Image (spheres, helix red, strand yellow):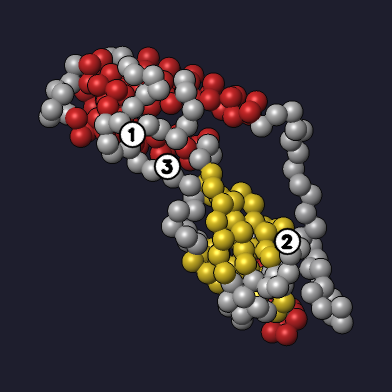
């Protein structure tokens, strides 16, 4: 296999080890590789990016961009302002309680909280009073491998081994090959090594849960305080 791995070299290795047909099975093997690639990137959250979205005054519900798989962090920058405020995730039920208890006037201001609603909707509280800007850091799906010389977005040596053994697992299941469990064990082993690599890459920062104060809402207007 080429190093770093290419789409072509990964497919060739899988085809050779499973004794598949290099012409008839090429597309099928490519699908296995891309399925494993997507699962790898979502499971480990290895591929992340950031983008912005503009809020609309008096509009609280938005459709998430299709690229967003999981939100990691968000902050809002008010119109004409430079100070950015980190947003706190809460439940949709909590936002509905705040809306019902605060009234329309009290529930409009600078966004402080958000809740995911279903597969592709996001709600903010308070309801934006202006066209502020949201910056979102999120996990995304990788760009699918299509051309022979395409290379994965994740680092080596993990890309070569994980995609190869993952595709071999799917191919062995397809062929009812007795080596399936061996391939799945190797795939799981390389996935674990990749997770360890990602943790070490972050450095020695201590991990702990943030403590949120979601039981109350900070007043957006000095004249009122919504509890």
Judge from the rendering whether residue 175 lies leftward or rightward of residue 156; answer left or right. Answer: left
Q: Is residue 172 visible?
A: no
85 vs 14, nearest the viewer: 85
Q: Is residue 114 visible?
A: yes
17 vs 204, nearest the viewer: 204
Judge from the rendering whether residue 98 lies leftward or rightward of residue 165; answer left or right. Answer: right
Disc 2 target residue: 84
Q: Is residue 209 above or below residue 107?
A: above
Percent of width and height locating residue 44: 53, 35
SS label for mark 1? loop
- Residue 150's disc is 1
Percent of width and height locating residue 102: 74, 79
Judge from the rendering whether residue 79 lies leftward or rightward of residue 13; answer left or right. Answer: right
Decide which of tag 3 and tag 1 comes sooner along the chain.
Answer: 3
Decide which of tag 2 and tag 1 comes sooner along the chain.
Answer: 2
Structural crowding at the residue carrying mark 3, measured as other residues with C-alpha within 10 Å and reported as few (<14), some (14–19) or many (≥20): many
Percent of width and height locating residue 8: 27, 27
Q: Is residue 94 above or below residue 74?
A: below
Q: Is residue 199 above or below residue 86?
A: above
Q: CA distance from mark 3 to mark 2?
A: 29 Å
SS label for mark 3? loop
Decide which of tag 3 and tag 2 comes sooner along the chain.
Answer: 2
Residue 33 image-quadrant placement: top left
Mark 3 or 2, which is nearer the eye? 2
Disc 3 target residue: 142
Which quarter of the figure is the C terminus placed in? Answer: bottom right
The residue that appears at 74% across and 43% down in the rendered structure is 209
39 vs 184, nearest the viewer: 39
Q: CA distance from mark 3 to mark 1?
A: 12 Å
């Amino acid at each position: 296999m080429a190093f770093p791995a290419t789409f072509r070299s990964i497919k060739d290795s899988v085809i050779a080890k499973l004794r598949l047909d290099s012409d008839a099975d090429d597309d099928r093997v490519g699908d296995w590789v891309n399925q494993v690639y997507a699962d790898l990137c979502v499971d480990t959250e290895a591929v992340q990016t950031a983008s912005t979205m503009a809020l609309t005054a008096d509009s609280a519900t938005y459709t998430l961009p299709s690229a967003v798989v999981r939100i990691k962090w968000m902050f809002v920058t008010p119109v004409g302002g430079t100070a950015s405020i980190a947003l706190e995730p809460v439940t949709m039920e909590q936002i509905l309680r705040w809306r019902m208890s605060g009234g329309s006037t009290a529930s409009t201001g600078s966004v402080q909280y958000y809740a995911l609603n279903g597969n592709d909707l996001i709600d903010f509280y308070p309801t934006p009073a202006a066209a502020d800007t949201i910056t979102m850091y999120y996990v995304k799906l990788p760009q699918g491998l299509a051309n022979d010389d395409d290379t994965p977005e994740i680092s080596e040596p993990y890309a070569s081994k994980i995609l190869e053994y993952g595709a071999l697992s799917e191919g062995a299941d397809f062929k009812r090959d007795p080596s399936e469990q061996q391939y799945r064990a190797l795939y799981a082993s390389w996935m674990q090594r990749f997770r360890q690599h990602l943790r070490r890459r972050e450095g020695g920062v201590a991990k702990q849960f943030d403590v949120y104060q979601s039981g109350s809402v900070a007043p957006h207007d000095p004249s009122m305080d919504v509890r």
